[in-house]
Amino acid sequence: MDNILIGTCSWTDPRLVRSGWYPVGRRGPEGRLRYYAGRFPVVEVDASYYALPGERNSRLWVERTPDGFVFDVKAFSLLTGHPTRRAVMPDGVPPDARDPGVLDEVWARFAAGVGPLREAGRLGGVLFQFPPWFRPGARSEEFLEATARRTRGWPVSVEFRHPEWWCEERYEETRALLARCGMAAVAVDMTQSLPTSIPPRTPVTSPRLSVVRFHGRSAAWGTGSKEDRFRYAYDEGELGEWVPRLRALARRVERVHVLFNNCCGDAAVRAAETMARLLGPSTG
């Protein structure tokens, strides 16, 4: 199935660079991206969560990747209700998500930053990963609906990190909400041993896109350092469990993005390579 695109959630992670996956001479900014894009058809831009994306970088990414390669861009922290440092805000703009003027300015900067990707047809999606305290309720639904209005016409995916969104009792209500907003639901693979674990459900809420993100199955997810949380190497059996589910998704949507977020050393790229092999030669 050539509508399943497989990649990772970073191509710049220092631990990946140190792992030796990039050959000598291909470890600078341009070389890394060209090398990565020669092996995978999609990548997630994680840096856009920490700082607003810039138009210049977006243009360079388009120039350095082949036709058909797409970028999934993670939404800036302020746009998902996460704490945001003043140092990464536009000059003179406070990190106050309650101020409509601040939100208008940040949305305008974010839209301009991803503009070159959209214009070139390279914006695979914008990922809104909401914090664990973003729980079901009227205020959250209003926030999602406002986000949908801001992003009308964009490919958008949503990852919830509060488990109640996808519990058995709320599943259909959550699915209907995202479908009404025109947003793709993100399916998650992670450890299921924690009270905060998100169940690995695969609802289809948009005809355009479905996204599956593999976080690794580390039991340190809720307590360890960032490296502890993502230090996990999938084995072939664990990935094989997902093959029929990914094929089923691919029959229902235009594109499926499969992204590995276990970015510790070369674990993510190795898992992506294995998944591509398991799914067959027509997948990227």
Image (cartoon, rainbow, N blue to C red):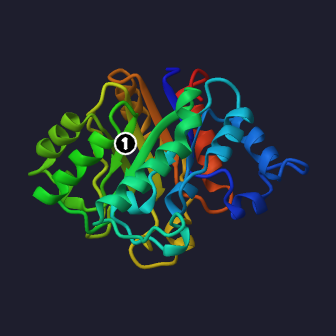
Q: Which residue in the rendered view is the most extreme toward the right? A: 25
Residue 181 versus residue 152: which sits nearer the camera? 152
**Secondary structure state at the residue bearing disc 1:** strand
* Total tally of numbered discs in the picture: 1
Q: Position of residue 259 (x, y in %)?
A: 51, 44
Residue at (8% x, 51% y) in the render: 169
Foreground residue among 158 and 115 = 115
Residue type at tag 1 = Ser
Provide residue 250's location: percent of width, then percent of height: 40, 25
Asked if one can make out residue 186 in the rendered structure from this viewpoint, the answer is yes
The C terminus lies in quadrant: top right
- Please rate how many residues cluster around mark 1, counting C-alpha atoms within 10 Å: few if below 14, some from 14 to 19, many from 20: many
Q: Is residue 280 left or right of residue 127?
A: right
Which of these two is toward me, 16 or 241?
16
Taking the spot 70% from the left edge, 58% from the top edge, the residue there is 16
Specify the quadrant of the image occupied by residue 133.
Answer: bottom left
Q: Is residue 91 above or below residue 185?
A: below
Image-quadrant location for residue 195: bottom left
**Relative to 63, 68 lies left or right:** left
**Residue that label 1 marks:** 157
243 to 271, vertically: above or below: above
Vertical placement of 67 versus 194: above or below?
Answer: above
Residue 114 in the figure: left or right of residue 191: right
Point 62% across, 30% down: residue: 69
Q: Residue at x 11, y 50 (%)?
A: 170
Q: Quadrant of residue 98?
A: bottom left
Side of 148 relative to 36 (left or right): left
**Residue 38 in view (yes/no):** no
- Point out residue 42 in the picture as x, y percentages from the top left corner: 58, 37
Residue 174 image offset from top left, x and y in percent: 17, 46
